[in-house]
Amino acid sequence: MSTTVLTILLGVGLLALGFAGIAIKILAKKGGQFAGTCASNNPLVQAEGGSCGLCGARPEEKCKA
């Protein structure tokens, strides 16, 4: 095999492994949601006073999702 084909296969394999790891984490989590992913928890969004694009929570509110 050429080096290029081997490099491409290695890259695709690593990407597949990453996606599989994320999928397993989602399946293992209760309800399939990651904790603390609401944008209102993000300090950069809090400084701007923006709201979460998913649930609409403001920085001073608890995530509604």
Image: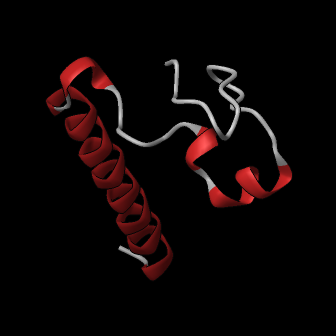
Give coordinates of residue 17: x percent, y percent. 28, 53
Residue furthest front as drawn: 60
Q: Is residue 9 left or right of residue 52?
A: left
Residue at x-position 48% and y-position 41% = 37
Residue at x-position 52% and y-position 18% = 64
Residue at x-position 14% and y-position 32% = 28
Residue furthest left as drawn: 28
Quadrant of the snapshot with the N terminus: bottom left
Q: On screen, 1 above or below 54?
A: below
Q: On screen, 16 above or below 11?
A: above
Q: Nearer the viewer, residue 24 or 33?
A: 33
Q: Is residue 37 left or right of residue 50?
A: left
Q: Nearer the viewer, residue 47 or 53?
A: 47
Report how many numbered discs are placed on residues in the image: 0
Q: Is residue 38 left or right of residue 18?
A: right
Q: Nearer the viewer, residue 55 or 28?
A: 55
Q: Quadrant of residue 38?
A: top right
Give coordinates of residue 60: x percent, y percent. 64, 38
Q: Nearer the viewer, residue 8 or 13?
A: 13
Residue furthest bottom as drawn: 3
Give coordinates of residue 12: x percent, y percent. 41, 56
Coloring scheme used: secondary structure
Residue at x-position 60% and y-position 31% = 61
